Image: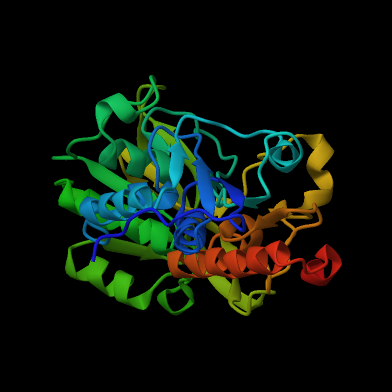
Amino acid sequence: GQDSPIARTSLSKRVAAVGSGPASLALAQSLARDGHAVTIFERWPHLGGVLRWLPRFKLPARVLEDHLEMLGRLGVKCYPNTEVCWIESLVTDEGFDAAFIGIGAGRPSVPELPGATLDGVLSSTEFLVRVFYDAQQLPNDWEPITDLIGRRVAVLGGGDSAMDCVRTAIRLGAAEVTCVYRRDEANMPGSKKEVQAAKEEGVRFQLLASPVAFRSTDARHVSQVECLRMELGDPDPSGRRAPRPIAGSEFPVEADLVVLAFGYEVEAAFDNEHTYLMAPPRGTVKANPETGATPLRGVFAGGDCVTGANLVCMAARAGLVAAQGMRRYFAGEPWERLTT
């Protein structure tokens, strides 16, 4: 049946969600069905977070739009183009009974390599946003990418975001798409299914190779990625064998578009007064994984901003966990029990 706003009662609470990715959307749906008044704040022009620039062959745009429309019918209010810098003010000054931090891990990990500022060297986020956003939705200095016909594309990295980029480049008509990854295929962090699909679609893989510099023939636009052959040594803390360079093994990968897909980090979203919310060394938000409660009373968090970059389904689950934590908080459970 059709979703419709749930009648508010004296027990209804006001909840703010900062960020509109899968964690916040799951929390908003869960609490709105309880009759709570949920407001989502998103700094980007459109809602959805990472869901907004997932390739359409993985998540059709209509699926996200239908979900957002359903939240609207449940009474969830959404404010795009709105950045929250002082999270504490939501619960101390703005009248919200609880707040949720669901800002994700949206800052691309970008290595400092010679030539990284050349035209044609993009982060995976910039690449996917320029492909899947309309021109009017993009920052002023970003042009939409509508096709890659005749282009040679190199994607650096071996995770799921790298596979999203190589498979998108294939669909845009690139003449050649190469994935460069520093370990072997057995140690690639992404989905084996995605890697196999990329192979079947024509992506070339340069494994046991690591970029060391970006070259240009005109000192302006990238034309080549200089790489170094690698070999695998002993396992690192992740359990995978650590790559180490082979001296004198440099070789080029020709490319006029390079996409850096080395994963994502949590972006510093709050000022220095909120350092007690952040967990070193990665800068993730401190939160009890069983309740979502943070050190700040009334503030919960979940998803990639807590765990680091992870699967969409795990972020959605964290939003549901935080929703349940809020229910316990609204029922009067001591904050100290929620945080320990």
Asked if residue 176 can be seen in this view, the reply is yes
Q: Position of residue 310 (x, y in %)?
A: 52, 65
Residue 12 location (% of width, % of height): 58, 55
Say which residue appears at 42% left-offset and 51% top-offset: 50
| Along the line of sight, the residue nearer the viewer: 305 or 255 | 305
Towards the viewer: 144 or 15: 15
Residue 213 coordinates in the image, percent (x, y)? 50, 41
Q: Is residue 294 above or below residue 78?
A: below
Of the 4 image quadrants, the one containing the N terminus is: bottom left
List the single residue furthest toward the front: 10
The residue closer to the viewer here, 90 or 290, is: 90
- Quadrant the C terminus occupies: bottom right
- Left or right position of 188 against 104: left
- Residue 181, by quadrant, is bottom left
Q: Is residue 143 above or below residue 104?
A: above
* Looking at the image, residue 173 lies above or below residue 118: below
> How many discs mark residues in the rendered view?
0
Q: Is residue 244 visible?
A: no
Q: Quadrant of residue 203?
A: bottom left
Q: Is residue 177 above or below residue 123?
A: below
Does 212 sit left or right of 251 as displayed?
Answer: right
Residue found at the very far top of the displayed protein: 140
In percent of width and height, residue 248 lies at 54, 56
Q: Which residue is at the front of the view, 84 or 3?
A: 3
